Amino acid sequence: MSWRDAITLAVRTVRRRPGRALLTVLAVTLAAALLTALLTISTTAETRVLDQLSSGGPLAGIKVAAAEPDPGQVDQDDAQPGAPKNLDDAARQEITDLPDVREVIPIVSTRMFVITPARDKDGHRIDPFQEDVVGVDLDKINQLPITLTAGRLPVTGSTSEVAVTQGYLERLGLGRLDAPQVLGTQLAMASGQVVSNGETNRVRGRWTKVTIVGVVAQEASNGQFLASTETVQQARDWAAAGVDASSALDLPTSPYTGLFVVARGIDNVSKVRAQITAIGYSTAAPENLLASVRRYLRVVEIVLSAVGIIALVVAALGISNAMLAAVRERRREIGVLKAIGARDRDVYRVFLVEAGTLGFLGGVFGTALGWLIAAMVGRVVNGYLAAQRLVGVQLTLPWMVVVGGIVGSTLLALVAGTLPAVRAARLPAREAVSGT
Amino acid sequence: MNPVPGASIDVRQLSHRFSSRAGTVTVLDGLDLHVESGGHVALVGASGVGKSTLLSVLGGLEAPQGGSVVVDGDDLSGLNRRELATFRRETVGFVFQHFGLLEALTAAENVELASSLAGVGGPTRRERAAELLDAVGLGARARHRPVELSGGERQRVAIARALANRPRLVLADEPTGNLDDDSTRLVVDLLESLPADHGCTLVVVTHDASIARRAERCYRLESGRAHESVL
């Protein structure tokens, strides 16, 4: 008997006993659903936790400072940099050329004078203050450790929009949930330039008006303002155009404040860090923390998988029991099959395919149901996160879970169906005459 | 029409016992039987004398425990499980009192199943099933499931299935035991025509004397042996 004929016969037989088949498939469905839901939720949770750890940036990111490495700190997640060392285009190119580097994103920052119309919680005006403004290529924001928590990001290339950080909110005495209050606020920002009349030096400012369009959590560089590279570069150029600028205003000499290097995968972070250290720059990456968290999350995943697998094994026992009952009930049918020429292996195949069919159906329905359950849990979680003004989770159904759910259920059912199939195959052909 | 004549049967000193907790029961004890190629033989006897057991042994459903059974030149005593399955598939067609149709399949699929087990491809076996169902007068019921057929119709489907692999020996175990008079007449007519129309030997186990009388030879089983009988 061909596999196709065996499958046809098995499917017809399953359909002929819908009640028993339904109950057996239901058991597998519930088990597969449990496994799928648990793995989907745990995978999503893992992604969420790791995202949080990297503040929205890629987990394979490495911050490179314009400083030499401190030999005693190179293995730290957030190493203290050594003596200043300029990061220029040559260094950027050298790092870009490293084999396991996917992307190098330059970061520039400059200190600016800020006037805000905001008042503190007692109603007093906030004194003008100096703060670092971080400039990045806003088109590559999703690769940087920057997460938008309210509003939107400045438009790429814009010199009239900025985003602020939690630090700015705290300066105003505001909490995270008050972020929307600062959106739309217009600030006056100035960069200084030292000018000389031959006898005395004085500082003159280049003033621009900018609007706060968003609130971000960012760890690209120190600074309470995030702007386009153009905004910061113009300010730096203005300051650098003055006389004796670096000594009078304590301006940085490095063309780039830092680089954000994205390695090809988390596993390459350590190697790339070592290579950058060898070039002569200080680096930082949360690799040790990530490794620890990943280990703990893996344990959680294993425990949840074990729960699902135990449920699947219980369901497989149900299949085995149902198939053994079917063999007992169908002794005459098995005898007839043999009387008309079926070999032992033909009967074995029919019963094995029948068990596999039950497992396959349970796997398909269970995976779909598990995804639905996970989606419902995701909606509840997102509702809670939204109430907390936090970014929601994006539920991901790993293809391994889908394939594993269906293939695993089918394989387990085949294993569970082996004993009944062997028993059926070994039944004597005379059951056709004497069986019930 | 099958150009090859039916199988001859030569049984010598066949013995068969059943063991149970209550003890061993000897059902067949030195039974001798000879059936000519293309013959039509009836086996009669009281319940429990071993008619069905003899049929099982002749059809290769179980191996002979003692003596020799030669069907169409094959000594069944020396065949293993796989060889017996091949023998059943290639040489024998069974018709049971309980019809033995698979409820999950249609009439045509039941007939096709036998060909499928013999490795016959889809189009050929579909054609053969249609031809056989036409021959037993059930061409219009090919897509009906057994539960949608009467007892007589089911038995005719079973006869069609028995003929699917062009057997040289057809064994019928109480083929009319569950049928009314009209259906019995139809089924017996059909069975009776098999040796001539399909070139096979026919052995029928029956309690019904009127059916047994229609056979060329009739054997009564008694005390584990077969005695030729005139009804």
Image: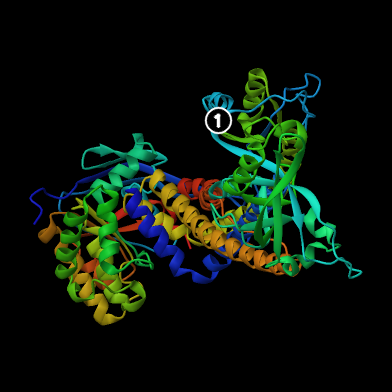
In the image, A424 versus A33, the foreground residue is: A33
Graded by Cα atoms within 10 Å as few (under 14), some (14 to 19) or many (20 or more), the crowding at tag 1 reads many
In the rendered structure, the answer to whether residue A212 lies left or right of residue B144 reads right
Residue at 77 percent across and 61 percent down: it is A116
In the image, A55 versus B178, the foreground residue is: A55
Secondary structure under tag 1 reads strand
In the image, A157 versus A104, the foreground residue is: A157
In the rendered structure, the answer to whether residue A79 lies left or right of residue A432 reads right
Residue at 75 percent across and 54 percent down: it is A114
* Residue kind at label 1, given as amino acid type: Val
In this rendering, the answer to whether A209 lies above or below A140 is below
Query: Disc 1 designates what residue?
Result: A101
Q: x%, y% of residue A62?
A: 66, 34
Q: Residue furthest right?
A: A122
In the rendered structure, the answer to whether residue B49 lies left or right of residue A59 reads left
Q: Quadrant of residue B133?
A: bottom left
Residue at 53 percent across and 27 percent down: it is A93
In the image, B117 versus A225, the foreground residue is: A225
In the rendered structure, the answer to whether residue B192 lies left or right of residue A52 reads left
The answer to whether residue B229 is visible is: no
Q: x%, y% of residue B123?
A: 17, 56
Q: Quadrant of residue A83?
A: top right
Residue under mark 1: which chain is it in? A
The answer to whether residue A195 is visible is: yes
